[in-house]
Amino acid sequence: MERPYSKIKYLYETKYNKANLECLLELQNHSQDVTINHSIIGYEELFNTLHFEILNQNQNISFFYHLLEKYQYDFSHSILLFISSICNACYINTENYFIHCYKRSPFIKDLKKENDYYRIDFDNKTIVFKKAPFYFQTLQQFSLAQLAQSQILSDCCHDSTYEICKNLEKSQACTALCHQAFHGTYYHSFVFYQNQCIDLNYNCVIPKEMYFSLLHPEIIEIIDSIDLNDKLKDIEFSSGKLLYSAIDTQIKSRLKN
């Protein structure tokens, strides 16, 4: 990433990585009886694995959540983990296994499937969501359903948003800043369509109002599908075009101020 982009990205995202990692390591130190795969790269992936194993093994759950409160953990990340696990489950038994496991979380009041969608009740909030492949099939967008099912872009929110918006008329590509698990913010892209938010990072579709109540995104840029190619034509990078376009918007805003 070229220097102007790196500086802005550092200011809003990268500089917080160390502080988040330190919180994770402290949590690991208090959970040594839980075995996790240390070959996984990235503090959030490690945290999600640790969190899942504590719930799965049904050990030290209350103490673990006490530590989460101590470190002011943003529980929306766990809700997104729960949603991702369910939406990426290929079999009913696997799906039910995840639901049974995640209901052990003291933050979860209820988690269940209702007809063709799922419902999570927590902290006086309700989030309903659908699996993205199923949602695209109902729209007869079979190529997008296949893309979601393949999970090829599951860790590439900017590229998956670009691919969906490019192929889904009257959709919008949105790039925003969201809260990291413990400290700071991170860049994230998702799709607006018919009052729904489509997010292939978690392979889910959530009503816009609920999605915003979960992530509290600070919107940087919204691009209509019809304007997408023209807006991004001067971005030289082969991937992450939405991210660089959003950072361009931030740079221009900072220069004005």
Image (spheres, rainbow, N blue to C red):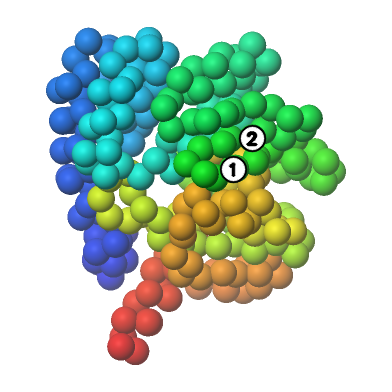
Relative to 81, 13 lies left or right: left
Q: Using the rendered view, name the quadrant where residue 28 is placed.
A: top left
Amino acid type, callout 2: Arg
Instruction: Please state the horizontal and vertical placement of residue 86, each as a whole percent of the image.
Output: 58, 27
Relative to 118, 61 lies left or right: left
Gap between marks 1 and 2, in whole Å? Answer: 7 Å
Name the residue rendered at 52%, 54% in the picture.
213
Instruction: Please state the horizontal and vertical placement of residue 72, each as a whole percent of the image.
Output: 26, 44
Pointer 1: what residue?
126
- Looking at the picture, does residue 154 appear above or below residue 188? above
Instruction: Please state the horizontal and vertical placement of residue 43, each as a whole percent of the image.
Output: 28, 35
SS at mark 2 in the image: strand
Q: Can see residue 31?
A: yes
Amino acid type, callout 1: Thr
Comparing 107 with 183, the one in front is: 107
Label 1 with label 2: CB-CB less than 8 Å:
yes
Which comes sooner in the sequence, label 1 or label 2? 2
Relative to 95, 106 lies left or right: left
Q: Can see residue 243?
A: no
Pointer 2: what residue?
119
Q: Which mark is residue 198?
A: none
